[in-house]
Image: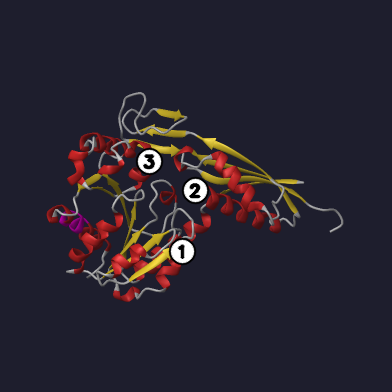
Amino acid sequence: MAIEVLRRSLFEKNDRAAEENRSLLSKHGVTVVNIMGGAGCGKTTLLERVIPGLRRTLRVAVLEGDLATTKDAARIEALGVPVIQLLTEGGCHLTATLVQQGLQRLPLAEIDCLLIENVGNPICPVNFDLGEHARIAVLSVTEGDDKPAKYPFLFRAANLVVVTKVDLLGSTDFSLERASSDILALNRDQMIISVSSGDESSVQQVVDWLLEKCRATGSGD
Amino acid sequence: MHELSIAMSMLELAEGEARRAGAHRITRIHCRIGCLRQADTTMLSEAFDLAKSGTLAARAKLEVTTVGMRLECSACGTHTELDAWQFECPSCGATEIHLEGGDEIELTSIELEIDDGD
């Protein structure tokens, strides 16, 4: 009988694959953004709205993470950008290894900006580095303003928080003030953008943020 | 349910270590998980029991130590340990904090059996 003290990270394998993804993507000048949030918070709709604006200057592709079905991928495909559906087959999050498989099927040399839509889940995906350069947390008005306090890891790990469905503010008791103050308590420098899919100027703010991120990472030069 | 992923990573790492040590069985696995990982220990145990069959750890016992949050206040320098998460300094209320712990997720030790006569 023997006892070994190891202290090895349980995410060692994932983190290694994430680093490989990051260096492969950097080599091709691809900026990757991991979009996370609960089921039904509006991640796919956000993608549908920002992609046309991004495409004016950048070559965009999407990795769609889902437990099952290709419904989301079909919506993105309709926009005419390359999209690969990653099915986790019941798994509640994407892993760097699964993303690695997706990357092999994309023409990386012809892509400036890769948007990864994670599985709809505000908890598990946060634990898994995919090799991304930035993270967006999506919070919808219909989910309730208590979510930043309930899922602090998601909102703390994000580089941008997008509050969606703000056109429904009047039909819910969601308080933008309460949500913002809870988000800022987690990260006082957090950038927050409120959007409504029908309001072009609000969507443009997210487009501008993404363009700036890609510029800073050196994509699309 | 990232508990299943955690359990599977744990088994993979433990089996690798056990094989390297020439062991035939893993009898105990110990890990440390910080509260920020939002992993449920009951669900982790259940996931572990599901995932362990057919591995060297088929009869292994899982022990999980949950670690609270440790933070250092960037404003007043106080070090605090908390059972649940909080992102402001309990002493002065500042939100400029440095996380010192609570996000651990690691395999800390395993107990192995090596059959005689090998």
Which residue is the extreme one toward the left? A201
| Residue A49, image x, y percentages | 21, 60
Q: Quadrant of residue A146?
A: top left
**Which mark is nearer the camera, 1 or 2?**
2
Residue A69 inside the magenta-drawn segment: no
Residue A207 inside the magenta-drawn segment: yes
The prevailing secondary structure element of the residues shown in magenta is helix
Regarding mark 1 in the picture, which secondary structure is present there? helix
Regarding mark 2 in the picture, which secondary structure is present there? loop
Find residue A98 and name its label.
1
Q: Residue at x 57, y 54 (%)?
A: B9
Q: Subunit of mark 3?
A: A
Q: Residue at x 38, y 32 (%)?
A: B86
Q: Is residue A197 above or below residue A180?
A: below
Q: Residue flagged by tag 2: what amino acid is it?
A: Met
Structural crowding at the residue carrying mark 1, measured as other residues with C-alpha within 10 Å and reported as few (<14), some (14–19) or many (≥20): some
Name the residue carrying label 2.
Answer: B1
How far apart in space, not on screen, are marks 3 and 1 (Cα)? 24 Å
For marks 3 and 1, the one nearer the N-term is: 1
Q: Residue flagged by tag 1: what amino acid is it?
A: Leu
Q: Quadrant of the C terminus of chain B?
A: bottom right
**Which mark is nearer the camera, 2 or 3?**
2
| Residue A64, image x, y percentages | 36, 63
| Residue A139, image x, y percentages | 29, 46
Name the residue carrying label 3.
Answer: A151
Q: Does residue A1 appear left or right of residue A128 in this picture?
A: right
| Residue B58, image x, y percentages | 70, 51
Q: Residue flagged by tag 3: what amino acid is it?
A: Tyr
Q: What residue range appears in magenta?
A: A204-209
Q: Is residue B27 visible?
A: yes
Front-most of residues B60 and B53: B53
Query: In this rendering, do the residues under marks 1 and 2 share a single chain?
Result: no
